[in-house]
């Protein structure tokens, strides 16, 4: 179960295997160099300044260089060795952090690219449940967990290696002291495991307190009309303080806990160092051991402590990593409800735009039906407007045609073929959308217009803009068509953005057009300009209009009135007015709002 | 915006005791750090090499057994342990003090900001995204802690330890001290050379990260368009491309950091090697003791840490400044509805409603684009006024003037004959209850949500309100009944259940004026009928303003107001309007037909 769940992550590690092998090799080197580092000091103290005999390999090396092992020479050798080891250490260390970073960031961005790929294709049923902010969090933050996971696995390895190399060298220098030195290690490991768990738990509780505070703030600000109307500001402030105090206490308790841990390891290390200093000092006094060896041991104690520290940090970090990994896997492992069948085929030629909706029912959640048994045939080139009170199912009905959702019952056919038997990409090629919110992307204006036809030439793009009444204002922008739209085109007015989205649909030139009340957010003057552009867009296409207001509906070939997910009446504007039904009533109520665009 | 840090420190001052304690502890820590290599020096020089103790440590002789080397060794070992214990204890105490003081000042600032935001007008909230405001409160407020504990105190500590170490080295050996000091300007040069580079690259990396998250956010929210235009693949490419760029920028930042580290450790390495060589020769000649050399070597490695601290100070200061700017920007926003200087208190009689008038009211959100034009409306105590009209006709705007979410440009709103701008804001809002399209439930218990306006209400009153709102039945079925905590935005309750809770909330508030903004529009017909019953109980004895689309909710209103493009075009009772044969009559006639048809088919 576990294995299956985590397998989607394996390829991301695999792709960096060469780096990981290198990292392991270099880690071994780092451990070796770290263990060697205090030895030049020993050389200086024992052999240059003291009077013990330098090691044989050094004497041989000096003999080859034709130098005599005088104290001055030995001092220089010690200094050079120290410099060399130090530089080697920092070089290897630098390489290690570089290798980690580059392997890590590649895994992270590979993973987020995979997540992005998946998120773009998951059906809207997923996105209805997960707000954009949440998906974004998974994409941008949680993807880092794969990096933390890798380092979480590697750092105990490094700790063990360090212990091993130090143990070997210490053993060769002095058996008893080596044992003394390493006695501290298991004790350190035990404390770090015990405390690591506690600190981890404490950190989790603390993060929970912080996120309580955050969601309290979020919800209060979201409900600001109610807050102000019910006058609960003072109480909310008090509540904020209470939660904050809680978080402060937890922060302090966390600090005490990790402080205690550091104190414990500190005591262990201090005791170890003191023991070594005492035993070693006595031995140096009695001449059984050299001073240099003592210094080497003391320096090893410091290294041991650093290792214990890093182990603890790893333990503390792994828990939130797991939560993040789970959130990533949620996305990677989720199966899509709108799927392409293997036998789905491409549409051979441009669709005629003949749509038939047959006994379609749909519900977002099983107990709340949105559409009930809807049947409707739309002829090629026809303009059909869907009207009705909000919540009647107008938008849902048109979303079924490009397969944003699949109906629970019934089927939809395009030119006689069930849309589920057409390749999704091929189906969507036949459909253009203009929605209430234009949804521009952070690309240039030209790229936004050519969104559905990336290969369009500049001339085609400008022609589309011209037809959408957008060319003029684009030319006035400092960078013209090359203006990059940041923040959903916030620099443009609502009407300008909408005209770009019309140009985009014009250029795509699909036989089917879906309009979801593109003018409702506009004032009357802008609306007239947009309507003119839309009329050009509609020529020669099968057009489905979702009309929250009836201004665009009245010119449609046919108007379909929906109420509570059912079709209650259909007919032309005149027919429906004459019938005196729901349309007639809504139309009379709204008539005055749209007198600006009443056509001849 | 000048002296932002002074203003920020204002939030740190209540914690001055902890901050001074922290400074003291830090000074203590620096002293301990400086003392750290000394026991070893004494062991090496005075015990192993048999030299007399230096004058500063001569008191060690007076300790019991001070003249025997092995006893002296034991004393020095004890000193090491004590020193280490002090060091760790100090660190624990300091992190405790800082954790408390730091988060307290952060939350102090956060609470202020939160409080301020709660009072800003809806116009401000309409312009600013909630996510952004939440980030300001929860993330950006950290700047005050960072300023104190990551900039000021470390700066002080770094300077102090540099000074003390140099002082001691100078006393031990002039030439070696100068040699060790030589590392400082070289490290400083490195800081200058790489500090800027690191900051520049970090900035570029952050910008790319911003672009990446922009692309992701906008793609995810534009998914219908992306899919309909079949651009998933090209956006995938674009995203991976940006990922690669960001990754490269990231690695470049890390490389700059690594280069700095290599440079710094090369300086330290060279310094160590020089010290070893020159110091070693001096020890050989007898002009320096071996122990002193060890002290020098230890200080040289310690030099690196404070230098690094100083290197990152300016970046830390700039980061805190960026956070502070976002905070003060919000704190300085003064978009509130003004409270009158001599507020009046209104004591409207309970259970019979209040007299509400709108006189010549004109209002809009942007200058030059009025949403309401010269609206006159009179609601007698206890009347139910239904507002009818197309989307954008100004219905919601009209009712939001009553609790002074906004003030009208022209004209006035009165309650019981008093201009509401003369009333105390809290008092005014006490008079008004709300049932909105979105009930806005909070993540508290059901009981707390019902008692939202009257936290003092007892359980009996809460249950009574729930019963009157037809909500008791489903509440008792919840796992903990009235003590069930509602999930985020009431996710575990159905829309109808949530709406009934908000009716119970309004019932318990028992205010003379009531605003209902499409309370049933998100519900299906069956749920709606369940609600109407509860609503009727709520309307009794109150002056109510109701925005609704369905005749079933509207026709019993005492007065129906038809709005069109910000003007009132018809008003009167259901009967009046039916008789006058205007827009409303046609609307009503149809809906009656339909509901009869529905009744027959059901």
Image (cartoon, rainbow, N blue to C red):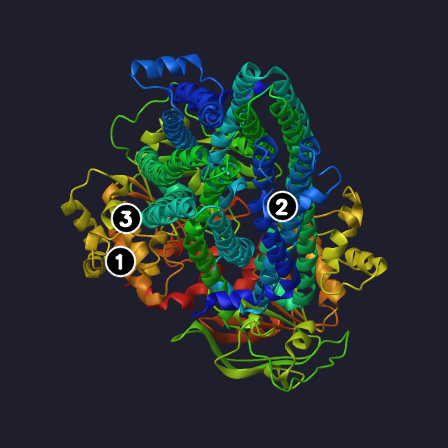
Helix, strand, or loop for circle 1? helix
Mark 1 neighbour class, 10 Å CA radius: few under 14, some 14 to 19, many 20 or more = some
What numbered label is drawn on residue B57?
2
Left of B267 or right of it: where is B398? right
Q: Chain of mark 3?
A: A
Q: Quote the CA–CA distance across marks 2 and 1.
A: 95 Å
- Can you tell which mark lies on residue A532? 1
Q: Are marks 1 and 3 on the same chain?
A: yes
- B27 or A325, which is in the foreground? B27
Would you place residue A421 above or below residue A513 in this image?
above
Q: Indicate the chain on which mark 1 is placed.
A: A
Residue A110 in sight in this render: no
Q: Quadrant location of residue A234?
A: bottom right
Q: Is residue B44 visible?
A: yes
B163 over A83 or under it: above or below: below
Q: Residue at x 72, y 44 (%)?
A: B62
Image spot of residue A497 (x, y percent)? 31, 55
Q: Quadrant of residue B282?
A: top left
Eye-nearest disc, 2 or 3: 2
Question: Spatial distance from mark 2 to mark 3, Cα to Cα?
Answer: 97 Å
Mark 2 and mark 3 residues within 8 Å of each other at the beta carbon: no
In the figure, is residue A220 to the left or right of B535?
left
């Amino acid at each position: 179960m576990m294995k299956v769940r985590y397998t989607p992550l394996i390829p991301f590690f695999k792709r960096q295997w060469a780096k990981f092998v290198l990292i392991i090799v270099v880690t071994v080197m780092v451990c070796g160099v770290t263990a060697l580092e205090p030895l030049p000091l020993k050389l200086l103290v024992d052999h240059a300044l003291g009077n013990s005999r330098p090691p044989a390999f050094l004497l041989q090396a000096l003999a080859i260089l034709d130098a005599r092992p005088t104290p001055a020479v030995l001092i220089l050798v010690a200094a050079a060795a120290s410099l060399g080891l130090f530089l080697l250490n920092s070089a290897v260390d630098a390489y290690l952090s570089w290798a980690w970073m580059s392997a890590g960031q590649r895994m992270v961005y590979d993973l987020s690219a995979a997540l992005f790929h998946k998120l773009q294709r998951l059906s809207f049923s997923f996105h209805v449940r997960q707000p954009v902010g949440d998906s974004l969090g998974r994409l941008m933050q949680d993807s880092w967990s794969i990096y933390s996971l890798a380092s979480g696995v590697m750092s105990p390895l490094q700790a063990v290696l360090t212990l091993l190399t130090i143990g070997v060298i210490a053993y060769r220098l002095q058996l008893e002291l080596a044992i003394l030195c390493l006695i501290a290690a298991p004790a350190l490991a035990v404390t770090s495991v015990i405390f690591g768990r506690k600190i981890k738990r404490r950190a989790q509780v603390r993060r929970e307190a912080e996120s309580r505070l955050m969601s309290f703030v979020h919800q209060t600000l979201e409900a600001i009309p109610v807050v102000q109307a019910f006058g609960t500001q003072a109480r909310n402030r008090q509540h904020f303080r209470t939660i904050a105090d809680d978080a402060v206490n937890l922060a302090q308790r966390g600090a005490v806990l990790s402080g205690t841990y550091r104190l414990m390891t500190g005591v262990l290390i201090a005791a170890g160092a003191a023991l070594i200093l005492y035993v070693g000092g006595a031995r140096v006094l009695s001449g059984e051991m050299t001073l240099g060896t003592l210094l080497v041991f003391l320096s090893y104690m410091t290294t041991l402590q650093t290792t214990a520290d890093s182990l603890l940090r790893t333990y503390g970090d792994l828990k939130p990593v797991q939560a993040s990994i789970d959130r990533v896997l949620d996305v990677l492992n989720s199966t899509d409800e709108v799927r392409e069948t293997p036998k789905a085929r491409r549409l051979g030629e441009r669709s005629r735009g003949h749509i038939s909706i047959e006994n379609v029912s749909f519900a977002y959640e099983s107990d709340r039906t949105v559409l009930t048994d809807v049947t409707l045939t739309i002829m090629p080139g026809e303009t059909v407007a869907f009207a009705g009170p909000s919540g009647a199912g107008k938008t849902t009905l048109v979303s079924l045609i490009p397969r944003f959702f699949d109906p629970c019952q019934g089927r939809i056919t395009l030119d006689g073929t069930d849309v589920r038997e057409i390749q999704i990409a091929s189906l969507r090629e036949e459909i253009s959308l203009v929605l209430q919110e234009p949804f521009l992307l952070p690309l240039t204006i030209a790229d936004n217009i050519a969104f559905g036809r990336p290969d369009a030439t500049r001339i085609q793009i400008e022609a589309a803009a011209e037809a959408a009444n957008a060319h003029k204002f684009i030319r006035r922008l400092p960078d013209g068509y090359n203006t990059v739209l940041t923040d959903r085109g916030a620099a443009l007015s609502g009407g300008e953005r909408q005209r770009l989205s019309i140009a985009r649909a014009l250029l795509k030139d699909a036989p089917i057009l879906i309009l979801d009340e593109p003018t409702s957010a506009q004032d009357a003057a802008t609306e007239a300009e947009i309507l003119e552009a839309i009329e050009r867009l509609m020529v020669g296409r099968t057009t489905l209009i979702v009309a929250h207001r009836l201004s665009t509906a009245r010119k449609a070939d046919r108007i379909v009135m929906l109420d509570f997910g059912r079709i209650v009446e259909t007919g032309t504007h005149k027919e429906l007015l004459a019938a005196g039904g729901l349309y007639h009533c809504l139309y009379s109520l709204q008539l005055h709002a749209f007198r600006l665009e009443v056509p001849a | 915006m000048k002296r932002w840090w002074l203003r920020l420190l204002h939030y740190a001052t209540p914690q001055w005791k902890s901050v001074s304690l922290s400074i003291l502890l830090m000074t203590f820590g620096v002293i301990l750090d400086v003392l750290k290599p000394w026991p070893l020096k004494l062991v090496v020089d005075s015990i192993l090499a048999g030299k007399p103790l230096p004058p500063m440590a001569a008191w060690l002789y007076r300790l019991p057994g001070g003249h025997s080397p092995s006893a002296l060794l034991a004393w020095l070992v004890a000193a090491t342990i004590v020193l280490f214990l002090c060091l760790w204890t100090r660190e624990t105490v300091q992190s405790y003090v800082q954790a408390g003081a730091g988060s307290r000042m952060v939350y102090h600032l956060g609470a202020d900001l939160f409080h301020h935001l709660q009072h800003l007008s809806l116009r401000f909230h309409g312009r600013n995204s909630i996510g952004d405001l939440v980030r300001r409160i929860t993330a950006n407020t950290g700047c005050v802690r960072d300023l104190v504990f990551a900039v000021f105190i470390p700066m002080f500590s770094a300077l102090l330890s540099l000074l003390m170490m140099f002082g001691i080295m100078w006393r031990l050996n002039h030439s070696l001290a100068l040699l060790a000091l030589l590392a400082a300007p070289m490290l400083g040069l490195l800081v200058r050379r790489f500090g800027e580079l690191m900051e520049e690259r970090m900035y570029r990396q952050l910008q790319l990260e911003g672009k990446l998250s922009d692309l992701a956010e906008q793609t995810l929210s534009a998914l219908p368009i992306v899919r309909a235009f079949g651009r998933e693949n090209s956006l995938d490419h674009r995203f991976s491309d940006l990922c690669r760029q960001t990754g490269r920028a990231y690695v470049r930042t890390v490389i700059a950091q690594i280069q700095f580290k290599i440079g710094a450790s090369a300086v330290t390495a060279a310094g160590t090697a020089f010290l070893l060589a020159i110091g070693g020769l001096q020890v050989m000649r007898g002009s320096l003791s071996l122990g002193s050399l060890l002290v020098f070597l230890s200080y040289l490695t310690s030099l690196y840490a404070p230098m690094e601290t100083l290197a990152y100070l300016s970046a830390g200061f700039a980061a805190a400044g960026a956070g502070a700017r976002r905070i003060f920007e919000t704190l300085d926003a003064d978009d509130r509805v003004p409270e009158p200087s001599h507020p009046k208190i209104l004591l409207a009689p309970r259970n019979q409603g209040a007299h509400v008038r709108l006189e010549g009211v004109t209002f809009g959100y942007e200058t030059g684009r009025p949403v309401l034009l010269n609206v006159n409306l009179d609601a007698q105590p206890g009347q139910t006024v239904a507002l009818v009209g197309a989307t954008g006709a100004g219905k919601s705007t009209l009712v939001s003037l009553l609790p002074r979410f906004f003030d009208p440009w022209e004209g006035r709103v009165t309650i019981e004959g008093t201009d509401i701008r003369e009333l105390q804001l809290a008092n005014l809002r006490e008079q008004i209850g709300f049932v909105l399209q979105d009930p806005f439930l909070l993540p508290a218990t059901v009981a707390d949500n019902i008692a939202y306006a009257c936290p003092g209400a007892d359980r009996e009153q809460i249950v009574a309100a729930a019963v009157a709102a037809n909500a008791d039945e489903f509440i008792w079925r919840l796992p903990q009944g009235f003590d069930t905590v509602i999930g985020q935005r009431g996710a575990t309750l159905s829309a109808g259940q949530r709406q009934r809770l908000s009716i119970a909330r309004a019932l318990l508030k028992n205010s003379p004026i009531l605003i209902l903004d499409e309370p049933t529009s998100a519900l299906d017909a069956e749920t709606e009928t369940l609600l109407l019953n509860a609503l009727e109980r709520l309307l009794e004895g109150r002056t109510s303003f109701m925005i609704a689309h369905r005749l079933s909710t509207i026709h019993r209103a005492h007065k129906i107001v038809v709005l069109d493009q910000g003007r009132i075009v018809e008003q009167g009772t259901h009967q009046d309007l039916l008789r006058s044969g205007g827009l409303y009559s046609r609307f009503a006639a149809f809906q009656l037909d339909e509901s009869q048809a529905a009744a027959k088919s059901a």
